[in-house]
Amino acid sequence: MIRAYPPRQCKATHVTIGIIGAPIRRISRPRIPDSNLNDDQLLRYSRHILLDELGIEGQEKILRGHALVVGAGGLGCPAALYLASAGVGTLTLADADEVDATNLQRQILHTEARVGMAKVDSAAQALAALNSTVRVIPRRERLEGAALEECVAAADVVLDCSDNFATRYAVNLACLRNKTPLVSGAAVRFGGQVSVFDFRRADSPCYHCLFPDGAPVAEERCAVTGVFAPLTGIVGSLQAAEALKLLAGVGEPLTGRLLLVDSLTQTFRTVAFSRDPDCPVCGAVKSTTPLPGHNSCSHHNCSTGKKHRT
Ligand SMILES: [Zn+2]
């Protein structure tokens, strides 16, 4: 019998699966006695649980996870949507701005009716409507100093969805100090980048290894240069994917790799980079010597980062 997709039945120990135009089949999944998921959760996250790499154990880790999303704009909106839909237990969202009309082209958590509202409050409303079981902590501020340290320390993974280098360097340093994995994303015009800095690993490079500040690269912000709307969705979704993998402990994150997206040609390519042993940021933290100021690194010798700038 051919039935329409999606199927309507899905019970705790039996999951109905199907693909478009194909007969529905029911498969049995053994009940896991020590599962902490209730029936609603088993149903809601059944498409994750069906994945061998995730299963119930991976979904439980996601449900227990706490993600900090820095920026509720073009990248933060799609990233937060997928984190919430996937069931991440706690989401801290930080952004100091209010929704304005120019945001609506790409910042898909916000609506016409919420122009003028704080972005974090607008985002919290949208996420609550999507998944009321997720605890959303809105922080209407540009995180820095002790507040940034506090939020990073409380999180299991951090998504840098900001649009400026000052924030990226500060988030990198806070994540490095707290050994919290960082998923970094950027999107300008038709070009995007994603990478992971997993500070739980001793060999992980940091953001500064890749992009040493003081290098002759002009900061490009979409408010000035423009940005292709779906590109922010692509990059933000990639960030969510990396964050979920890190929370669940599955797959191979983009640690030591920079994913470059060109939406004009729809080309994806990955370049490898490694930790710079002379990096004044991660080198200083790891050797516990005093950290330099962010503007004191203009002679930093990291050819890898310069080579990969876009
Ligand atoms: Zn470094």
Image (cartoon, helix red, strand yellow):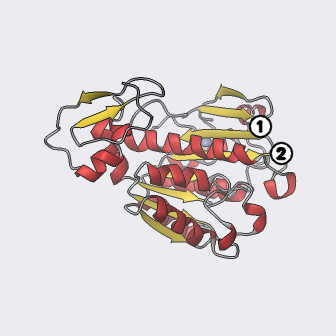
> Which residue, given by chain and number where applicable, does mark 2 sit on?
217
Identify the residue at image location x=60%, y=56%.
Answer: 77
Residue type indicated by callout 2: Val
Q: Position of residue 78 (x, y in %)?
A: 59, 51
What number is the disc on residue 283? Answer: none
The amino acid on which the numbered mark 1 sits, given as a three-letter code, is Arg
Pointer 2: residues within 10 angstroms few (<14), some, or many (20+)? few
Sequence-first disc among 1 and 2: 2
| Quadrant in the rendering for residue 269 | top right
The image shows residue 295 at horizontal and vertical percentages of 75, 56
Query: Residue 309, labelled with which disc?
Result: 1
Marks 1 and 2, how far apart at CA: 8 Å
Q: Closer to the camera, 10 or 267?
A: 10
Q: Is residue 92 left or right of residue 73?
A: left
**Secondary structure at numbered mark 2:** loop
Front position in the image: 32 or 271:
32
Q: Position of residue 71 (x, y in %)?
A: 62, 60
Q: Residue at x 73, y 62 (%)?
A: 103
Closer to us: 261 or 115: 115
